[in-house]
Amino acid sequence: MKAVYGILLGSMALSGCIESDDSDSSESTTSFNGKVADGYLVNAKVCLDLNANNSCDDNEPYATSSAGGAFSLSGVTQSQIDTNPILVEVLAGETYDEDAGDPAIKIETAYKLSAPAGSEFVSPITTILKNKMDNGKTQQTSIDEIKAILGDGFNPARDYVAAKASNELTTEERALYEKGHKIAQAIAGLIANRLNSNEEQGLDDAIDTIEDQLQSLKDYVEQNPNSPTDEVVESIDANILSASNLAGIWVGSYFVEENGSLVLDTSGAIAGAYIFNNDGTGTFLDGYEADNVNCVDVEMEFNWSLVGMTLNLTYTGIENGIEAGIDGPADPESLVLSHFTGDKVRFPSEEVETGQYTSAILTKILTKISSTESETRSVCSAPGI
């Protein structure tokens, strides 16, 4: 995995005079100054994202960050500052993270950071804050949710690089921001991995998956305080659902809820084997049985894509399905996967007929296996599988 240095610290400042099509030309311009950090980021592109497309376009006010992550956007109006989010583009081979300690060491993998309108600080943590707000939560609710994980005394909008060395804070408060800095470094690495593993994935989708793992990230940092950032990223990244780690062979089992817990369907039915190929194609083997019993001769090809936690399946064909009473491809599915742990993924609960149940609400959980495709097919000996 490529190293990613940086945590966006932002006490941002805008200054200058740039008119935009969506602003009143009679409104006076001002400046807004700030900072960006993973550690303080030098030579990153900072802009007001006027059209909210998570890209610094040519007609948008922008600046390049300097030492200490400082930047100054000029020619902006107060209404632009108050209503448009801030976006940072970290440039591979150009941006330097001062945490690295050597200006010759450039960030190897490009990524992006953002912050809500009016923010004076931009970091990986403000990127999560903005994403929560984009998903309909108020700013205060979003802040409270982050504090609930990172600590009540942690202000997600504060420059954590400066805070962890501030004599105005207690030892405990400084330690909180020290930990926040390390968590932010890992978030930056995860963002970079998400954006670069799937060119079609946008910043919002990348942050959706990372936000779900914030508690795990914080726990890992606490339990492994001396682990290098790359190790933290690698550990957490393995437990974030993505197109790259979904690729492989997964065997499905049905679970029924009993006394508030999911218990394996005692009929022993296996809910098929899913083979997800790296190129977005796949095959579903219906009747895959761990004990080679009651094989159903169905093999369906499909195309798949993953957007955030939503798995889209479009079945394109069927082989040997007539014998099983299936005369065509299954209907397309768009499934919001409810849980992912690295080697298990949970499908939404649904009413199905299987094993001892004529009709029951069951939950299908897929478990990743290490077998090859040919080994997987050989487990069920029915013709065609």
Image (spheres, rainbow, N blue to C red):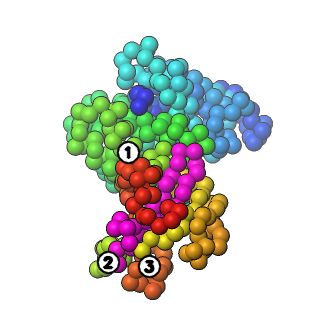
> Which of pointers 3 and 1 lies earlier in the amino acid sequence?
1
Q: Residue at x 67, y 36 (%)?
A: 77
- Tell me the CA gap for discs 2 and 1: 31 Å
Check the image and report above or below for 239 versus 74: below
Closest to the observer: 8 or 275? Answer: 275
* Label pair 2/3, CB-CB below 8 angstroms: no
Residue corresponding to mark 2 = 266
From which residue to which does the magenta span run? Answer: 266-293
Query: Is residue 206 visible in the rendered structure shown here?
Result: no
Report helix, strand or loop for mark 2. loop
Residue at the farthest bottom position: 358
- Tell me the CA gap for discs 3 and 1: 32 Å
Residue corresponding to mark 1 = 238
Closest to the observer: 143 or 353? Answer: 353
Left/right of residue 58 with respect to residue 82 in the rendered view: right
Q: Which image quarter is the N terminus in?
A: top left
Three-letter amino acid code at disc 3?
Thr
Q: Is residue 290 magenta?
A: yes
> Which of pointers 2 and 3 lies earlier in the amino acid sequence?
2
Query: Is residue 105 visible in the rendered structure shown here?
Result: yes
Residue corresponding to mark 3 = 354
Quarter-wise, where is residue 174 in the image?
top left
Three-letter amino acid code at disc 1?
Ala
Closest to the observer: 367 or 115? Answer: 367
